Amino acid sequence: RIASMASMEENFPRGGVQKKPTVGKTPDSKLERDNLFDVRHEEKSQKRKRSQRDQGKQKKFKADKTAAAKDSVLNIEPLTIEVLCEGMLLLGCIKEVSDYELIVSLPNGLTGFVPATQISDTYSKMLSKQVAQGELLEDLNSLSDMYSPGTLVRCIVTSVEKSADGRRSIKLSIDPKKVNNGLNASALASGMLLSGFVSSVEDHGYIIDIGISGTHAFLPRQKAQNYIKAIKRGSDLKIGQNLNCVIVEVKNEGRVVRLSIDRSEVAASLATEQQNWTLSNLLPGLVVKARVQKVSPLGIKLSFLSSFTGIVDFIHMDPEKSMNYSPDQVVKACILSVHPTSKVVRLTLRPAFLHPGGSPNQLSSDRVGAVVEESTVKAFYKQFGAIFEFEDGTLAFARLKHLSKTRKSFKPAAFKTGCKHKCRIIDYSLMDEMYIVSLKYKIIEARFLQYQDIHTGDVVQGKVFAFKPIGMHVKVTDGIKGLVPSLHLADVILKQPERKYNIGDEVKCRVLECNPAGKKLIITLKKSLVQSKLPVLSSYEDAKPGLITHGFVVCAREFGCIVKFYNDVKGLVPKNELSSEPISCPDKVFHEGQVLKVMVLKCEPEQERLLLSFRLSSKPAPEDKKECTPKKKQEVKYQIGEMVDVKVLKKKDNGLEVSILEDEGSVVASIPTAHLSDFVANCRLLWHCLQEGDVLPRVMCLSDKGERIILSRKSAVISAVQEEQVVRSFPEIQPGMLLTGYVRNVMPFGVFVEFPFGVTGLAPKVSMSDKFVTDTKDHFVVGQTVIAKVMSTDEEKQRVLLNLKVSECSSGDSAAESFALLNQYFKEMKEIRNLLKRREESSMAQALCELVPGKQLQLVVQDVKEDGSVLFCGSCVTGLTVTATRYHLGDKNIVPGEKTKAVVLHVDALTSKVYVSLREELLKKRAKQRLTQNSQHSAIVQHVAEEFAIVSLETGQLAAVPIASHFNDTFRFDSEKLKVGQTISATLKVVKVDDHGVLLAVQGPGKKNVFVRVRNESETALEEMIPTVKHSLSLGDVVTGTVKSVKPTHVTVAIDDKVTGSIHASRILDEVPIGSFPTYTLKAGQKVTARVIGGRDVNTHRYLPITHPHFTRTIPELSIRPSEIEGEITAMVDLKEDDALKKAGLYNVGQTVTCFVKKYNILKNWLEVEVAPDIRGRVPLLLLSLNTKVLKHPEKSFKNGQAISATVTGTDVTETKLCLSLTGIQSLEQGTITVGSITKVTPHMGLTIALPGGKTGKVSIFHLNDTYTENPLGDFKVGKIVRCYILSNENGKIQLSLRQSRLNPKSNNKVEDVEITCINDVKKGQLVRGYVKSVTPSGVFFGLSTSLLGRIRFQNVSPYFVQKHSLYEKYLPEGKLLTAKVLGVNGKEKHVELSLLPEDTGMPNVLPESLCLPRYGAERERKEADDKEKRKELKLKTKRRRENSESEQEAKPKKRKICPADENDSGVEVYYREEEDDDQEEEAAKKKSKMRKPGEAPRLQVSTGFTWDEDMNAMDIPVLNPKEESSESEEEEDPQSKLKKRTKKEKELERQKKEKELCKLEAALMDPSRQPQSADDFDRLVLSSPNSSILWLQYMAFHLQATEIEKARAVAERALKTICFREEQEKLNVWVALLNLENMYGTEETLMKVFERAVQYNEPLKVFQHLCDIYANSEKYKQAEELYHTMLKRFRQEKSVWLKYASFLLKQGQTEATHRLLERALKALPTKEHVDVISRFAQLEFRFGDPEHAKALFESTLNSYPKRTDIWSIYVDIMIKQGSQQEVRDIFERVIHMSLAPKKMKFFFKRYLDYENKFGTAESVLAVKRAALEYVETRSSLADT
């Protein structure tokens, strides 16, 4: 009953129950419902047609029964994609953000896409600009910077597109122009909630684009602060960012609106009737109060905003209340969508949407794809689907089609409330706060549901669905599509894939790459990859050395192949790893797309570098395991140069795999074969002899890059690293250095040499050898040890060019070098022999050890070969090959089987060969002779091995002689090679037969050819090695000869055909001029007479005394000095010892000697000189000169052979060379100036400098310069040469100074920062500079000099109070340069108190104002003004505080303020300070005015404006207060008069006098001509005329004359309150005056405050224009320019603004800018204004700019608009003023010949005539009249026709 009653009530409403629905609104909604939801069923479509027919009737008859019956069945369906149409407004929630689009969740599980071009106009323009420029714009933010998932946005549907596979996609836009299309400026009301975009960022806020034309929306900064903080996306809003804005204020009929995005204001906003929303402009996202009209199971019908109806579907009812709604209930609802044609409004009652600016509950995208075992049915809607609840309370929705496999198999009974089902989450809808699930078995069991489920390397099934030029599209599942690139369609490249595959074919493929974020899936159909069982390589981290997998070739070139794997991992197979056979052209063997097995050799994941090989080792698996296990533990890092002992684990082809013993063998390293020894032969031998388990001691770590530690046993390389003769990085390399390294690679163009620490250089072919290089491979082999000299470096390309020529790289002593090589070789041979001795199991190894050269054996002849050589056998040589060449048989004839004796010459352990000799001279026993070291012997070559030759001496003993003289001496021509039987000269070096069985010797001068071009640098060698020739010369003989060659330090002379002598540079002149080159006085071929003064040993180049047994075999040393030819020779007679160089001891320290430059040694940094033929010396770099320029490039300043004068400072360690100085003996006493080289730079402290004589000194940062700088050590680098002044030298500690005032005292340069040596140099009140030392709890310590520190208390650091001391540390870091003022000095305790306060130093505050810190005493000043007692207390406190600091009463000159007692404070602050003169006071006042509290207006600076004496005479017209004056004067006259009692008469007189004065005063006040003289006068005047702005302005001027700015401000404020609001102009005058006042006396801040207020209360444009004028008049052109820019944005449509700016620019002389401005103006202003604007611009140009350009403007305008007589008239006027008469006449002539209206023509003729009457002649006047007559006649004739 009740229900039927209700329905009747509904159908036949009683009067007054329901408000009348506005016509056309409710019925529309019914129509829309039919349209929307009854699409699929026939019967319903008929109803729809009927309803359309009935529409008109419904409007007329509200109680129509059909309508009522229809309305009673409330049919509400969820939103479906079919309903959507272009222009539909929706509320959406951002689901995902990608680079180019936003994916938006829409109501009812729909999803739409917003492309980047549909964000806003501004954003699209910026995107186009970026594309056009081709470079990133700074202020263009990416979508992900501005939008985050979960944000609600208002969208409009732009299109619903259907794709190829029948799916529909919804394209949306969030551009406010489209979303707010229904709104216009007049419809805007405060409280409205709109969406807008940041269009530009301004100083005080943001301009927001709300898409309504003609409306400017501004968002003040303070209204955006808490929103910006909450979203945590930077400190500013970004251009293009979407905002929910509430309108706070609407002005000028909606042309200007002020917005707020304050979170609380937005959340509280409600759409109300007062805001006048209509169905055409209703927006989604608005929250409304609604009344429930009708409730049905599928939803609710609501009415809202008094007259609108809307619907809520079942998904959007509040889940908590679901069915608890009753009619007439008032609820809050949020609009979800508005249909453009049917105007159906959908709403939501879900709580999350009822507060604008919030966001719906976030669902995790991670759960998508998860299978839910039990989900409970919460509600079932038979046409749409079911709502489920998970165990955690989350809701989910399953569409009808997802509830069962097919429509037929669907059983509604299974979906009763409470039933449980298994389902899988397939998506989520943020707008519905629900997951979307499916119950289909196929979907629950599906392997892949989304891209995230697919992993690289997965094998998947798919269907071919399209062919594209780039490849083939394969559909893996409904939502997942993949691309097979053309290269991957098959194992071979297919030209026509459509022949192999058809659309719809099932294919099996493998995932190469999957990027879920970009929904990108790349797959391959190559069978070999799809079916591969090898591991998948999908990241560089997985690429472990030894891993074998399949890859495909992407490129084959001459350098090798690039192979790709999964996830775009790619690596290089170098040429040598392509195959075991060499491949010359890889591109012919391998093709693109080819699938091959590859092995990983090395991988560097950080650099993404991968080295691969096609050469797979035979047993990959075990090796792989072995390699990997130790590597896991390899966390220990070894330093290059570290020495370790190792144990051999395994022998490989290219070297040894070893474990480092220090780490219990857990770290695996490798020693390449070439690094086992310096000798190539020994490398192979060692590799051959070593076995697994052998221990190698003392091996050096060479590199620790990549997978392996590489070790080296090269002794030359090890010693170079240990002696620091290495470079660690490229910048350390200097030309001229000699470095030990090893050959990295041998190329046809040269040799690459690598050095320890990874530096590599190239020795080009020309620099490889002293000999001609035909083939580089003949000279060097990879891995060989070499010594290289740096020729040059290229910083940019990091290239080093090297020289390997022996002549350049040898030290000069070839004998010593070659002996060192031989010695090292035999040392290594001994180690190998010891190694073999330990091999007990091998008898052959034992036999090899016992065989040494020189051992005699009993052998049996085994065989005689054709070439005459013989093979032997014997019990002692079992298993070895024993052979003798034909030469070694001597004269013996031998037959097989014969027994014989033989002597061993050489044992080759590598090939197990023993070379023997049967020659008698080697077999016969001789008496042992005592051999002496360095004795020379002739020797016969018996056997030539790889590194040495075995020779026999005349004594029959065997000796070994090195073949190479140097590491780099590797190549010999055939003619130079030693041959068996050849006789050579040998010098013995080791005279005892050691374990080696041989003596060690070096080759003597007999080996002439090899030494061609080897220069012996450190000894004075002769250029050509002179053969040993016996001569009969003796000391003192006079000989004649011919000069053969002239060298810098000696001359060679041919004495006769065989004997060659040498003359040293010191033996040419008696008096050698310093700087001359004595040897060059002789010429080649010149005849000379000389005397023998000594002899030089051919090998050692040492001088031999005449008594020496070998003297006859020397090179004679000659002299042509006149004194020595004639006089006695004393040079060498006395020397009896073997070593003549002990002579160095004869020189005394301090003695001056003349010496000759040999060369500058770059490595050792010294100059090598020769004093005499037998005396050498060295000059260290720092003793070469006191001039730093010379020291920078010493090699340029000293030429070889030049004579220089030097002082002896001592001898070197060996006492064989003199130590010399070119700058005298350096005393290093206090006050001297010397040079030094920087060895260390210590931050904030100073420098350590190496001084001459091996001493070091220190320089403090206070002594680096006379002017302190921010980064004092910036200019100093290690190695820089500097001049230094020695400040002190005590206890071996030397203090230096680099100040110019010390080094050049006469230079008179200004010393900004004077040296402070002691506390007495600091005076109170002085300003000092220094560096911050540290910040401690007791203050800041401040370095004033090396020895003196000052302290700054925190209250003297800054006027701000700082709680956190870390702030001080941030702004006062150690080493910061500051200026401080000395407040006090305590000499006894050496305390200096300093201040950094700005008023003390005149410098800016050390803590920036932007920190907004409280000031010291800010509160104190406030309290002082309030309360006098508190002031007393404060005084006591400050007194106490003052007593705290030592001697601070007189020391602390902090300024204190006298507070004036009266409140009429003039605004001028007065300071006083003890012991200061007046100008300092003035300065202090100025500074104080600069340093104010934040926000405090500055006090008056009386620099501009009024003079103090201005119009003083105006002040004394009538005096307004004579009473006081007269009484004062009386008091002065008679001090006793007051005491006496006055008589009656006196009193009467006084009364009369007073009355007269009053009359006088009244008369004066009544006088109209009288000027007001006091504030009272003005008060009277403004009372009588309150609306007169002139009076108010005079009043302000009166106060300003008295410099009372505050009072003037107060008068202005009074005026603004008093003047009637209708008097707009009068008020504006006052505002302008106030602006003027602030501009002149205020700050920028106070001016802007007044300006903002003025804009609010007046017409903004006028205020802007006035401020521009004020700025321009006060020459603040920059501010004026900025203001004009703002005006152009704000008043684009105002012509006057453009003209005013143009006039401003022209006055500035910026004509070009004006021309650009005109273009902008024409774009901005409507077309009808253009002519006028151009003409006005032209007039301005005439006045201030370029008249020619102005004429051009007029001409072009008149060409376009010839009939604009007003423009012609203006043009004529201007030309009459500016132009010549001819120009004016030309214009008139043009005008009068135009066809204009007669009235206008008459006007121009009249003007022309007037002009001619005024300026012309009688003829010209007549001509005008004639022209007028002609015109009249032509007009009348035309009229007749």
Image (spheres, rainbow, N blue to C red):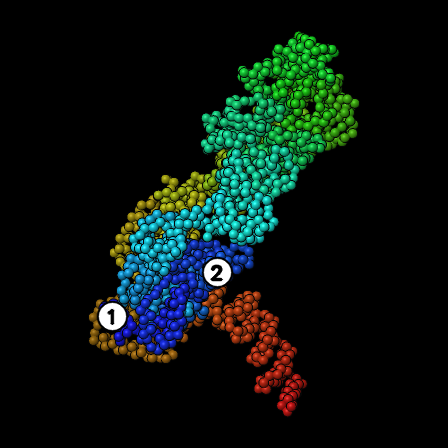
Q: Position of residue 1630 (x, y in %)?
A: 39, 71
Q: Which residue is mark 2?
A: 162
Mark 2: secondary structure: strand
Task: Kindly identify the residue that appears in the image at 58 percent across and 33 percent down.
Answer: 755
How packed is label 2: few (under 14 Cα within 10 Å), some, or many (20 or more)? few
415 relative position to 714: left or right: left
1120 relative position to 729: left or right: right
Q: Quadrant of residue 875?
A: top right
User: For the C terminus, which image quadrant?
Assistant: bottom right
The residue mark sitting in front, 2 or 1, is: 1
Q: Nearer the viewer, residue 1833 or 557?
A: 557
Task: Kindly identify the residue that appears in the image at 50 percent across and 60 percent down.
Answer: 126
Instruction: Judge whether residue 779 can be spotted in this image.
Output: yes
Q: Which residue is mark 1?
A: 5
Q: Position of residue 1686 (x, y in %)?
A: 46, 65
Q: Nearer the viewer, residue 1505 or 1474?
A: 1505
